[in-house]
Image: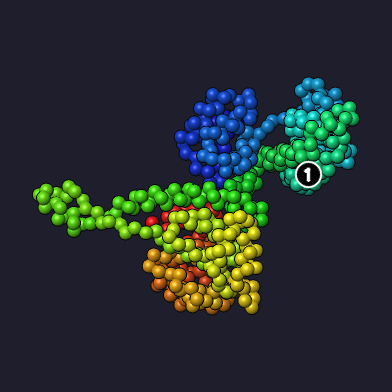
Amino acid sequence: MTAADRVTGLVRALRAHGFGIGTGETVDAGLALEAVGFDDRERVRAALAATLLHGEDGRPVFDRVFDLHFPLVEAFPEASGATDDDPAGDGPAGPAAGPSVDHDPAAGLPADPALFRERLRERLAAALASGDDTALNRLAGEAVGGLGGYGSSPGSDGWSSYRTLSRLRPETLLARVRAMLREGAGGEPEFADRLTDDEIRRRIEGFRERVRTEARRRVAERQGRDGVARRAVGTTPDRIDFLLAGRDQLDELRRTVRPLARRLATRLAARRRRAARGEIDLRRTLRRSLSTGGVPMRPALRQRRPGRPELVLLCDVSGSVAGFAHFTMLLVRALHDQFSRVRVFAFVNRTDEVTDLVARGRADPAGLGERILAEATVTGWHGQSDYGTALDEFAERYLDALGPRTVVFVLGDARTNNSDPGLPALALIAERARRVYWLNPEQRSLWSTGDSVAHAYAELVEMRPCRDARQLGELIGRLLPV
């Protein structure tokens, strides 16, 4: 495979993950590689990252895709015909290399898995103590090849990093590595303590990542790099599906609130500056044209009425849609300067105002959901979503929050658990507000399936799919009036 094929394959895989990479960036990447050469792999990585990425948010995804298209080629003992005296097959063994375990020449597998595992752990401990990156790369390849294969015969179907790490258990080597360091320092703890336990853990986690990279590389060689890059490489935080996000992903997503809010504020401010010029007043323009023989040389503009819109959020905070609602609450709170007033309401089967709770949630965004459920009256006699009761209660208690300048965002999957959908209440809300938008985290193909009444609500208000933070930012930046 040529260098051009690798670069275009890398760009294609990054585009599949939502990176905006154009032809110009691709050409720049080729020129950067021509300048830095291919002798230093990390320099190649840095050059491609500098030319293809527009920020640091996507760097973790870029690194994983890069490792698939620009793999670290190592000659491992089972593949290179190395001997015990020359375990790397390319010269004298280093102190962390050690003797390799005999492998089955037909399958490339260890003849004695238990002995292979124990010797590999010994060599891994030595490599972690010395910090030898070359040895760690070699050992990662040996570990995946010897311990990570699965199928009818190990390695026939693929390789698993989880299988490898669960058998090797590198995290249990902390005490052994610490003992090696102290022994190498002549038994003087003050010298061994220069490398702290945190540093050893960091090296162990680095080795675990090497194993994951090697497993993906081997699978990619068999199944194709593009397919593995789509399935096995995680996406950027702003592309995480709200309904599929786990706790760690939601925490990562919350960290994107402030950068996303800054971008949206800039976009809204630019729209507001353009709108401040006003629209053309046709009647006044034609009157002015009388002085120029009927030619409208000086257009007259209607003066735009000053004032920022009011925003009301009505959020379902039950079940899997809770993460979507909490993220949107925090984002809107970060954007509060763009509106004259912001009010936030939450519901499960009861509706309550949580504006103050969201304002206090900036200090602890991860605990916002627990505070809402504990301090607000959002549940009644059961814990399932009841859109009809919640909409009726909002229309009865909080209709004064709506006015001719109010934009309402309803957040929820429109699944009523087969209860009354409360269509008259939603129609009343749409009548009183300036605009009502319903943001649904489910894909369109699932609307009105099962207990969903999405299409019934969509006949009364404008409903849009909103599955990740990128879509949410685009919708808020485009739909909000300025």
Q: Residue at x 75, y 47 (%)?
A: 162
The image position of residue 315, as x and y in percent, is 54, 66
Looking at the rendered image, the quarter that the N terminus falls into is: top right
Give coordinates of residue 346: x percent, y percent: 56, 68
On screen, residue 243 above or below 93: below
Judge from the rendering whether residue 25 lies leftward or rightward of residue 161; answer left or right. Answer: left
- Circle 1 — which element? helix
Left or right: 239 as drawn, with respect to 423: right
Q: Position of residue 365 (x, y in %)?
A: 61, 56
**Residue at the image position 55 percent from the left and 71 percent from the top:** 352
In this rendering, position of residue 184 left or right of residue 244: right
Q: Residues within 10 Å of mark 1 (few under 14, many from 20)?
A: many
Quarter of the image for residue 55 reads: top right
Residue identified by numbered label 1: 165
In which quadrant is the C terminus drawn? Answer: bottom left
Name the foreground residue: 356 vs 330: 356
What is the image's colouring?
rainbow
Residue 387 in picture, x, y percent from top left: 54, 73
